[in-house]
Image (tube, rainbow, N blue to C red):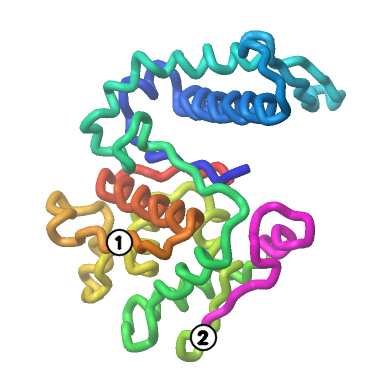
Amino acid sequence: MAIDYVVDYKCYPKQELGTEGILERIKGRARAEAVIKLFRDNGDNRPVHEIGFELERVTASGENETKVVMVQNMIDQADELLPFQHYCEGCPANVNGQAFGCIGQIEYPISGKAELWMLNQLPVPIETLPWMLLRQGIREFKAAGEAVNSMRAEGQPFFQEKGVLVRQLGEMIINTNQLFEMLFLLGHIKPSYGATLLMFFNIIRRDMSADEIMALAPSPDDVAERYPLLLKADEDDDNSTKRFKTFFQAIYVAWALNVRLLLDV
């Protein structure tokens, strides 16, 4: 299980296969590789074309349906991506420099270390304008994080931390449920909102005047010079924190291109 995101930049592969088509093929290959590993770990060395598994789903009529899925079919469908990979070379939406690098995911469970990293990125009261905008946003969206509470229940796979982490920023107390809601539960991220998130989480500089903040969207032509990406890798980053940093990089790329970042939570 994971949060999937896509930089909504129009390109030839997306025109031919569709964004969903590309995403499903990428997921299909990952599932196939996981199933093959499971079989091999259990001493089953049958050829890949003989490996299958049962998949249960609910039909449109509400009935349960079980079918056998052959791993080789999933691999064959994923291989349909191969002729399109060269279009990703030099693509401005390619976040990670790999084939179909406009698509990424944050895997569950989200670590407490990643949640703490996000809390520590937020503006403090002496950063007056960003702090006031964050406070206003929390109030306007009524982002209390209730929608996330059930995801922290025992037995749920979404968070390592079952208790919510908090930070006091002057008169405002903010918690990691609120951050999750702000990032993932308000729909696809439009460029204007993306720019605001980048400022809140210190991904771009926030020493800006009110007029400059208001002019962040659409992004300027010289965005890389005026607002360089401030993200840096840290040798102490765990996998979850690395995934979040790549996610924020994707928000930056989408904002720079003035397109949405699509979310599937």
Q: Residue 203's image quarter?
A: bottom left
Where 121 sits versus 170, above or below? Answer: above
Disc 1 target residue: 232
Vertical placement of 22 versus 251: above or below? above
Image coordinates for residue 66, horizontal then vertical, percent: 82, 20
Q: Residue at x 45, y 28 (%)?
A: 19
Q: Which residues are magenta?
A: 147-167
Please tell me how crowded label 2 is: few (under 14), some (14-19), or many (20+) other residues with Cα within 10 Å.
few
Circles 1, 2 touching at the beta carbon (< 8 Å): no
Picture coordinates of residue 110, whole percent (x, y) = 58, 57
The location of residue 150, given as percent across then percent down, is 74, 60
Q: Could you tell me which residue is drawn at 36 percent across and 36 percent down?
A: 101
Please count the marks in the image.
Answer: 2
Q: Nearer the viewer, mark 1 or mark 2?
A: 1
Give the labeled residue for mark 2: 168
Labelled disc at residue 72: none
The kind of residue tagged 1 is Lys
Residue 93 or residue 38, whichever sits in front: 38
Q: Crowding near pointer 1: few (<14 within 10 Å), some, many (20+)? A: few
